[in-house]
Image (spheres, rainbow, N blue to C red):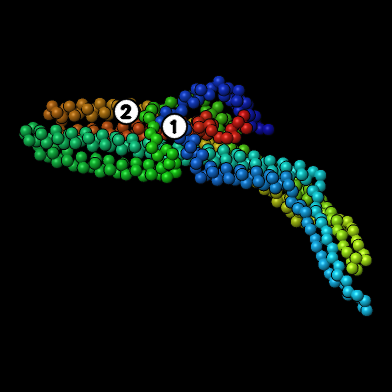
């Protein structure tokens, strides 16, 4: 075992030892703008992707029952014939027989093991389907939150410019402002109203996409909260993401199943014997025959090729395990970096937005006192809007990265039916 694998195993053991003590802190770190957990559970349970995986689990259980029963049903043979003799009577003759192949010792155990691995693989596929569906849910949920926030900020800008237009019109009528100010206010309002309508359209699209995929969440709303990084460091969260990962485990179970199927193909090179019992009545009952038969198929090259095929598939699956592990490790590291950088970036953008908004407020008061022209007020207000939009977008992006980090570490929405089996 490589040093990297040893280090990862040690980290995993440490995580298991401290998981119970840190569970409350981990869950408290989940962004509060997420949908209600009970609604998420209903959404995941009712999603077609999850239900399809559950149907495949039922198919795997049926396959296990088939392997337990074996593939050698009882056979029945019936025969009838007419015997003609030269110069003698004709005889009606008939026969009946039953036969069945019998599974050799050792093959039953392999079949049982193959069935069990198939069920375990399907269970991991169910967990992986829930995980992937939850990832999709997070993406659509935060897309709706982002478009909703953008719509609110643009609408707030519309309300400000409408008030600014009324103020400007009053000043123009009283002679305190030029007619050009009124035109500028009208033009700025028209532009912002158009932007607000586009934001509303994007929000409607995001709402429609969320409702189409997860109707249980169509009416749920999220709170506006600042991002907070969960405790512990990057290495711990990467280890948590790789521990009991359903995608890795499903591929591992498939590899184990293929190795067992290769052993089963090797065992089939010694064929199962077919035993039979038959009775025949000949010469009109003058002869009654009772007999036993034994038949054995002679295996050919196909059985060796079948075994080699399964072993090659198992070797390919082993490489897939390594590839999936590398990809998930990279994703976990990326999740951590996005979350950590997002929190820091949001704080900087929020401070900048607060400063720009204070400047915009001062600019407006200066305009009311006649110290600045309207163009400068409008420019300052537009800069404040853009700064606030950037801060809010970064806030939601950071919360989404934190939620993804928790989800991939199985610290969010833990409602998978087979979760206890991994402890």
Mark on residue 352? 2
Instruction: Give the side of residue 215 with respect to residue 171, left or right.
Output: right
Q: For this rendering, which residue is in front, 296 or 72?
A: 72
Q: For this rendering, which residue is in front, 78 or 165?
A: 78
When the figure is inspected, residue 330 is found, relative to residue 361, above or below; the finding is below
- Reading the image, the residue beneath label 1 is 36
Q: Residue at x 47, y 39 (%)?
A: 43
Q: Quadrant of residue 249?
A: top right
Percent position of residue 33, x then y: 40, 31
Q: For this rendering, which residue is in front, 218 or 15?
A: 218
Q: CA distance from mark 1 to mark 2?
A: 32 Å
Percent position of residue 264, x then y: 75, 47
Q: Quadrant of the C terminus?
A: top right
Sequence-first disc among 1 and 2: 1
Pointer 1 local density, CA inside 10 Å: few below 14, some 14–19, many at least 20: some
Q: How many marks?
A: 2
Q: Residue furthest bottom?
A: 87
Q: For this rendering, which residue is in front, 242 or 264?
A: 264
When the figure is inspected, residue 16 is found, relative to residue 47, above or below; the finding is above
Q: Quadrant of the N terminus?
A: top right
Secondary structure beneath label 2: helix
Q: Quadrant of residue 167?
A: top left
Percent position of residue 365, x then y: 17, 27
Q: Residue at x 47, y 24 (%)?
A: 28
Instruction: Give the side of residue 5 with respect to residue 89, left or right.
Output: left
């Amino acid at each position: 075992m490589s040093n990297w694998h040893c280090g990862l195993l040690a980290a995993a053991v440490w995580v298991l030892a401290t998981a119970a003590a840190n569970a409350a802190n981990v869950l408290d770190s989940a962004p509060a703008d997420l949908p209600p957990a009970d609604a998420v559970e209903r959404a995941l349970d009712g999603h077609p992707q999850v239900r399809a995986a559950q149907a495949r689990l039922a198919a795997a259980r049926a396959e296990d029952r088939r392997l337990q029963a074996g593939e050698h049903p009882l056979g029945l043979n019936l025969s009838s014939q007419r015997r003609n003799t030269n110069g003698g009577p004709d005889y009606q003759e008939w026969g009946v027989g039953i036969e069945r192949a019998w599974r050799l010792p050792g093959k039953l155990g392999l079949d049982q093991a193959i069935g069990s691995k198939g069920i375990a693989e399907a269970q991991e596929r169910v967990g992986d389907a829930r995980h992937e569906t939850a990832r999709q849910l997070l993406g659509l949920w935060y897309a709706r939150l982002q478009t909703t926030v953008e719509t609110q900020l643009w609408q707030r800008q519309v309300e400000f410019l409408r008030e600014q237009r009324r103020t400007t019109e009053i000043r123009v009528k009283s002679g305190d402002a030029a007619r050009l100010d009124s035109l500028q206010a009208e033009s700025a309002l028209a532009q912002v109203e158009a932007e607000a309508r586009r934001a509303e359209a994007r929000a409607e699209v995001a709402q429609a996409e969320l409702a189409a995929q997860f109707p249980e969440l169509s009416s749920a709303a999220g709170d506006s909260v600042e991002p907070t990084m969960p405790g512990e460091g990057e290495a711990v969260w990467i280890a948590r993401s790789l521990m009991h990962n359903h995608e890795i485990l499903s591929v591992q179970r498939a590899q184990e199943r293929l190795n067992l199927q290769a052993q089963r193909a090797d065992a089939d090179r010694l064929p199962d014997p077919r035993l039979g019992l038959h009775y025949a009545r000949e010469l009109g009952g003058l002869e009654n025959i009772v007999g036993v038969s034994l038949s054995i198929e002679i295996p050919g090259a196909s059985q060796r090729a079948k075994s080699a095929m399964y072993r090659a598939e198992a070797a390919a699956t082993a490489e897939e395990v390594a590839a999936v592990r590398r990809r998930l490790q990279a994703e976990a590291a990326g999740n951590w970096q996005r979350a950590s950088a997002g929190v820091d970036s949001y704080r900087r953008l929020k401070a900048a937005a607060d400063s720009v908004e204070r400047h915009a407020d001062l600019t407006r008061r200066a305009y009311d006192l006649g110290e600045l022209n309207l163009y400068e007020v409008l420019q300052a207000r537009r800069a404040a809007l853009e700064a606030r939009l950037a801060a809010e977008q970064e806030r939601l992006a950071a919360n989404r990265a934190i939620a993804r980090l928790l989800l991939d570490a199985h610290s969010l929405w833990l409602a998978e039916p087979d979760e206890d089996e991994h402890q």
